[in-house]
Image (tube, helix red, strand yellow):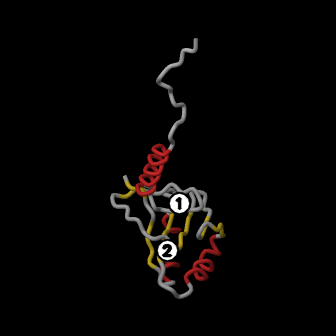
Amino acid sequence: MALQSKHKVESAFSMSSMTDIIFLLLIFFMLTSSFITPSGLPVNLPSSETSDIALQEVTVSVTKDLKFAVNDKVVNRDQVKAELTALLKGKESQVVLHIDKGVPVEYLVEIGGIAAGLEANVSIATKPY
């Protein structure tokens, strides 16, 4: 006597709805993520009320222990002007300064003056409150 159930349970699982959900989550996180590229050196940025996002063509970073980097290339303090001159080459560019909040202001003024002397627009990277 062979007893069999009329209702068979299907053990197959359809992944199509799961892939749709994953794809939508991926799009959501890509659209809501920050479009700011981090600088090469770890810098503790100062806070400000307004923090605009600027297109970062050239970045200059200065850490608390006075390490300098131009576009993620670590350089000496004396080489900053030569690197900026080579990168800007007479074209109008945006230079974003990533200066640690523990760095004396004289370094900010020095690098900002070099970039302004090369006719670049200078902005300071900050983090919002």
**Mark 1: amino acid:** Pro
Q: Residue furthest bottom?
A: 90
The three-letter amino acid code for the residue at tag 2 is: Val
Q: Residues within 10 Å of mark 1 (few under 14, many from 20)?
A: few
Q: Which residue extends farthest top?
A: 1
Crowd tier of the residue under label 2, counting other residues whose Cα lies within 10 Å: few below 14, some 14–19, many 20 or above? many
Marks 1 and 2, the one that precedes in the sequence:
1
Count of marks placed on residues: 2
| Residue that badge 2 annotates | 95
Is the residue 21 above or below the residue 46 in the image? above
Q: Residue 108, how many percent across, how many down? A: 50, 68
Secondary structure category for the residue under label 2: strand
Describe residue 64's horizontal placement relative to residue 24 as left or right: right
Q: Position of residue 122 (x, y in %)?
A: 45, 74
Res 86 quadrant in image: bottom right
Quarter of image, res 43: bottom right
Q: Foreground: 60 or 11? A: 11
User: What's the residue at 53%, 88% (across, down)?
Assistant: 90
Residue at (59% x, 69% y) in the render: 71
Nearer the observer, 2 or 49: 2
Secondary structure under badge 1? Answer: loop
Where 37 falls versus 109 (above or below)? above
Q: Which residue is mark 1?
A: 38
Instruction: Measure how far apart labels 1 and 2 are at the Cα level.
Output: 14 Å
Give the image location of residue 67, x and y in percent.
62, 62
